[in-house]
Image (cartoon, rainbow, N blue to C red):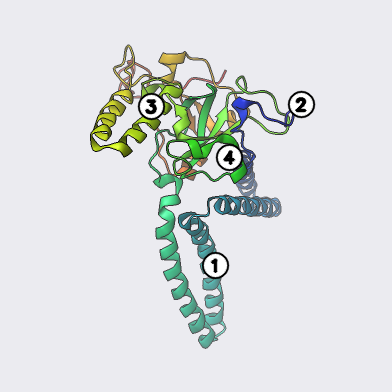
Amino acid sequence: MGLESDKPRPNEVERSEMVNEEMVYFIFQMDLDVQLQRALNYEAYEFAQGVRAKRQRVDEALSVMMQRKVQNVSSEAASAAMDSSELAAEGLGLRAKMQQAVEEERYSDAARIRDMLADLERRAKRAEALAAEFKPSRVPRAFRLGQRVKHRKFGYRGLVVGWDAQCCESDEWAEAVGVASLPRGSKQPFYQLLVDVRDWSFDYTLPPVAYVAEDFLWAPEQGGPEGMEALQGAQSRSQDAEGSTAAASSSSSSSSAAGKSQEGPKTGEPMSWVERFGEGPFRHPYEYMLFLGRDARGDYLPCKQLRDRYNVQRRDVWAPGDDGTEDDDGEGDDKPDIFPRI
């Protein structure tokens, strides 16, 4: 790995080929969708057919990768999430066959397929209910798409591009990172991060992309210490809670105080990245493909495709003193303040 050694540096142990692979497939999907739309606009249908074939191959490769993630997790919810998508595809195929049977007046075959569809729908509903807890959009989490964060232990800067409900990496990766020793172990959100290129060494085989447990991440608006002392405090409070109810009550109070958001010096809002670290840009080769630019707090605005992938709404943040309701000319402005890329 890298030019000098196959062994990653200690602060780069969370580098993830799995996350990078998933990001690359997603970027390919976005690019192919643009090519397809352009071909259709120009009525270049033969070219569009070739683009659709490429898109299908990318989708199939992504499906194989997602199956690997499910195998790494081995939970009923994760397996159900994969089963749910497979059952939906199977249902579409059966409906097409039933329609064909009706058109050809093979009514006994159509009735048999109808019964198969009914059974399939019952299985799909059960799988969907089980899969709900594994869906990223359903996971309670501390960080959001486009938010800039720091690693509590290693101090590197990251940009959130996604998450999983729990650790989906291999056992070997989890052991190298020490997932089992975390306060919440593997059963917590794990974030897909772009890492600022200035914080990790150059690796010609793999861009700086990390997979990080929520326990390890910190952002200015959370307040409290940004280093490992907060994580160690959480471990101590957890141990105290097991010892006595009184200790649990006390630790809950201290945890609440430690987690209270710091206020920005001017706005009264939780402290922003800009207020804490300045207006310097984030640097990563994938940034311009996945984000529209920076908002007034220093975080990044995810593109529509990325927002749709995690079923989240656009979050506009206005510059201090400008709430977007009135311009200097007295007319409303429906656009947030977005800093250009540098």
Going by the image, does 145 lie left or right of 326?
Answer: right
Tell me if label 2 and label 4 are in contact, CB under 8 Å: no
Which residue is found at the position 54% from the left and 63% from the top?
89
One can see residue 147 in this view: no
- Which quadrant of the view contains residue 246? top left
Work out whether mark 4 precedes mark 1 in sequence or the reverse, and give the earlier one: 1
Q: CA distance from mark 4 to mark 1?
A: 37 Å
Which residue is found at the position 38% from the left and 41% from the top?
140
What residue is pinned by disc 1?
A: 90
Q: Nearer the viewer, residue 197 or 71?
A: 71
Q: What amino acid type is highlighted by mark number 2? A: Leu
What residue is pinned by disc 3?
A: 233
Secondary structure state at the residue bearing disc 2: loop
Residue 175's tag is 4
Relative to 129, say whether 2 is above or below: above
Going by the image, does 51 lie left or right of 106?
Answer: right
| Circle 3 residues within 10 Å: few <14, some 14–19, many ≥20 | some
Q: What amino acid type is highlighted by mark number 3? A: Gly
